[in-house]
Image (cartoon, rainbow, N blue to C red):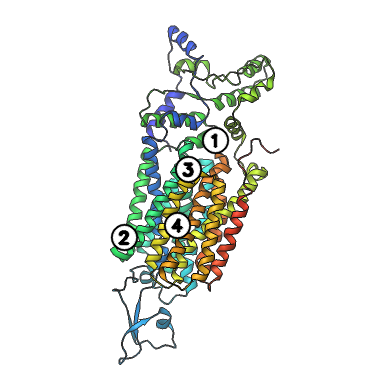
Amino acid sequence: MQNIEEKQLMQKLNSEEYPVSEQEEGTQNDKSRNQIVFEDVDEVLVKIGGFSKFQFFSFTIIVTGMAAGAFILYNLYYFEKEPTYMCRYNQQSSYKICTSEEICDDANVVESYFIDWTDEGSLHNWVEQLDLKCRSSIAVSFIGSSFFFGAFIGSFILPRASDVYGRRPMFLVGLVLYLIVIIGLVFNTSLYLTYVLLLLGGISETGRYYVAYVYCVEMMPDKYQNLSGLLIFVVFGCLQILFSIYFWFISKEWINLAYMGGALSIISFILTIWKLPESPRFYFSKKRFDEARVVLLHIAKFNGKSDINYFVFESETQYDNKNLLENNGNNEIGQAAGENEFKGSMLSQQTQQKLGINVLKDTTIDFTRDPTAAEPRLSEKQKIIQIELQLKGTLGELFKNKTYLRNLLIMTTIWSFGSFGFFFIPFYLDTLKGNTYLFAIFSGSAELLASLACILVTRCMTLKQSIILFCGISCAASFAIIFAFGSTDILVAVLILFNNFGITSTFDVAYLLNTQMFPTIFLGTAYGFCNIVGRFISIMSPIIAKIVHPYPLIIMVIFSGISATLALLLKRMPDQIDK
């Protein structure tokens, strides 16, 4: 789906009705010797404003849609939280605090009971709406597991589809699915339908969050991508704290959060349809250079950079001339194309005359000398660009390349640890005795601090070193909680803060590291594959969180240690394709 402005510009570029006078033709021929040539999308983004108005606008719209999901996902624990019950067993006895097990146990004759709504822990949530009082803990835990199972299924579909059909349509699909889930949850009274809706919500998550993350950072110049990704996590850290404050001090009603989440989804959907184009990096990776150019010119116009009316990509000229050599057996034409491999435009001379291309960059190479003389002129970045443009985006290319495959397996392990720990902590809070709101605020503060710390830490060390550091922090904190279990609320809360700090930082950096480990054409697929395994393991997080202490934390210690060790084996994208 293209915006109206994009369509009009595309029609203009493709139009053949550009009358050119003889005088204009001579002028254009002179200009064709000085074309504007850019190395890749990143160089264009820097030239047309860097992080400017369009980047801020697109960041806001996409993150609004991403954050909408937090209003459900981040609050599953609160939605399942049991209220405080008051029971009495005969008319002579007074009411006292009791559990749902006592109420539902046929062996205990509870004459009457009521919910103490004056208690801060009693919420109007799914326990009341779905009548979960006498349901087994496994049945209730499967509510959260249904969401993770849906994300597991969705990871096979939407991330891969985003590498084939584009980031924008898959993001929109995720928003639509999420709106359906919101509407269903508001009116639903069936536990089994809840399973289905949350499974659908998990599928929507892969488009509305994981594809959206790629979509968002691909709109940014390279030097702002890490910062943009970390700012997304800052937003989610703030939301987690706000949700705890909401239930503790503002309201006991879960449904208000559903309304807010639905409203944000609608706003993001409408503005994306109306104002946001497809990712130019996606088009470039698919060798759809004209469409990438249209999007970038649209961004330039939005940012007020009217001095750039047209340009070509350096890789585009090479790709076009390569096709010319392959498709034309005429030796004369082939020789001419070869001599101009690094300086010709992909456009015909007639089209150059029509558009008045202005070339500023000299990429000419003298082929009359040693043919290998071209090699030193290519930067490492240019080599990587050329390698990526040789890729067709098939799964076979991803799995046959040894470097990509090793990175994929290691990143999947690290991602699984981050995903499991991220969702494990909220459910584990329920097993701790004390003020769960306080624990949740400390946990949310850790997520916020982790994102802010990542901004600083990643400037001082590599992403790989950052992963090892944060996994180590989580390992140490999990080990400490084993011995602090049952002690003072403040001590346990502080240790949970450190544990969640390490887990969240690991998860945050894993997002950033993925963009360095894989080419753009495989980026959505890589995120999807990591998410498939990560979500499958996360399905068990609500269940493992409920098992007897200290086994849940022992699992976290082992998992974090393995992740830190494997991170040592990560390798940047290869400088040449494995044969």
Q: Residues within 10 Å of mark 1 (few under 14, many from 20)?
A: many
> Residue tagged by mark 2?
256
> Disc 4 marks which amino acid?
Gly
> Disc 2 marks which amino acid?
Asn
Q: Earlier in the sequence, mark 1 or mark 3?
A: 3
Q: Which numbered mark, 1 or 3, is in the foreground of this view? A: 3
Q: Earlier in the sequence, mark 1 or mark 2?
A: 2
Toward which corner of the image does residue 20 lie, by quadrant?
Answer: top left
Cβ–Cβ under 8 Å for marks 1 and 2: no
Residue 210: x %, y % from top left: 48, 49
Helix, strand or loop under label 4: helix
Q: Is residue 156 visible?
A: no
Q: Outermost residue, right direction?
A: 579
User: Which residue is depicted at the point 53% across and 27% down?
Assistant: 39
> Disc 1 marks which amino acid?
Ser
Q: Earlier in the sequence, mark 2 or mark 3?
A: 3
Q: CA distance from mark 4 to mark 1?
A: 30 Å
Toward which corner of the image does residue 75 lie, by quadrant?
Answer: bottom left
Q: Which numbered mark, 4 or 1, is in the foreground of this view? A: 1
* Tag of residue 226: 3
Q: Is residue 556 visible?
A: yes
User: Which residue is depicted at the point 38% across and 41% down?
Assistant: 273
Q: CA distance from mark 2 to mark 3?
A: 33 Å
Q: Is residue 26 above or below residue 254?
A: above
> Residue tagged by mark 4?
201
Q: Outermost residue, top direction?
A: 23
> Residue tagged by mark 1?
285
Q: Earlier in the sequence, mark 4 or mark 2?
A: 4
